[in-house]
Each structure stands twice: as structure tokens, then as C-alpha cells.
Amino acid sequence: MTLHIRFFDGGSAFSAFKSQGLLAKLQAVCPEIQSFTAHHIYLLATEQPLATADHQRMAQLLDVQSSPSAAAAAGVSCVVSPRMGTVSPWASKATDIARNCGFKLRRLERLTEFHLQSLKPSLSASVTSALQALLHDRMTESVWPNRQDAQSLLTSPWPLWMSSKVGVQPW
């Protein structure tokens, strides 16, 4: 079965106060970091493509844009998601709400996309790793290099085989 994955761009993930604190931590690791943006993106997995009307209704339900964001400037970009093989409490509730609104979907998940603007066009792997460590909780979240790779969160077979072993229905 092929899942149809759709992205929706949300708003800012953090308040100005939280962003200032995180920027100070990022700059302590890498002084070349000038600024960063963090916004939510939503992944929607359906078994059938969304009709145009359903696409617009979902964008309205999420209060989001339905088109991808522009590419980021030089620096580090990554996407933080719930840990691979898990379904976040947010996704569980949001999926139920969307289904109650008449959507036929497999799963709806919220991720955070980060773009760190740097004075250097590229950063070393060790610096990038240290920066990513500040952006996520390694016990409950996964880091992806981009949103296309983050689709694996919804297409991985792990929850399917695991659900048959513990008697739980997948998504």
C-alpha cells in the first residue's frame, strides 16, 4: 500500500523569549550562528490522495498554509520529529480530531523545522551534531536532515509489525 504524504507549513514554533534563550545556547556552541527560525510543519498520511476541497479543509483545520516554505539561507537546516517508531500524544489527538471532522487519514503529525543562519557557508559535522543536540530531546525525538527524509516517520513499517505483536491497531 502506498501512502500519500502531504506537507502543511505552520507558524512559529517558539515564542520570542524562548527563541532568544535558544539562540544564546546555539551561539555558545557556534559563535558563527547569526539567527535561526523554527516553525511547525505538519505531515499528513492518507491512503488516497486528498481532493482539493479536503486539502483546503485540512489547511483550514490546521490554520496553516498548504505550500512549502522558501529555501533557507546558508547554515544548518533540520527537522525534529517524535522519535521514530512512536506516535506522539499530539498526533494521537490531532488524528482523532481530523477523523471526527470527516477526514480519512492514516496519521497527522507535527514536526519542527529549523533553519540556522551562519556566517560560514557550511559547518563541520561535529559542530552540526552539537547544534542539533540543542534542538531536540534524544530520548523522545529524532532529527532529520530535511523534510523529505522526515517522511520516513510515517512510512516506516515498524509500527505495523509491532502492532500485530502487541494487539494494538496501527495509527
Image (cartoon, helix red, strand yellow):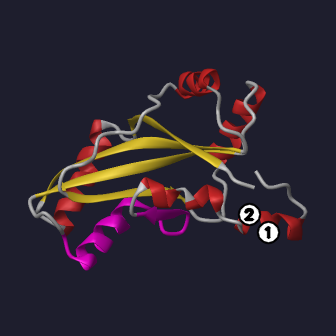
Q: Range of the magenta residues?
A: 123-144
Point 73% across, 24% down: residue: 101
Residue marked by disc 1: 162
Task: Return the x and y of residue 146 as percentages of the image width and height.
Answer: 40, 58
SS for tag 2? helix
Identify which residue, 20 or 67, lies in the foreground: 67
Screen quadrant of the N terminus:
bottom right
Point 63% across, 52% down: residue: 88
| Residue 142 highlighted magenta (yes or no) | yes
Kind of residue indicated by mark 1: Met
SS for tag 1? helix
| Residue 152 highlighted magenta (yes or no) | no
Determine the image quadrant of residue 53.
top right
- Tag 2–tag 1 contact (CB < 8 Å): yes
Please tell me whether residue 162 is drawn above or below residue 2 in the rendered image.
below
Residue marked by disc 2: 159
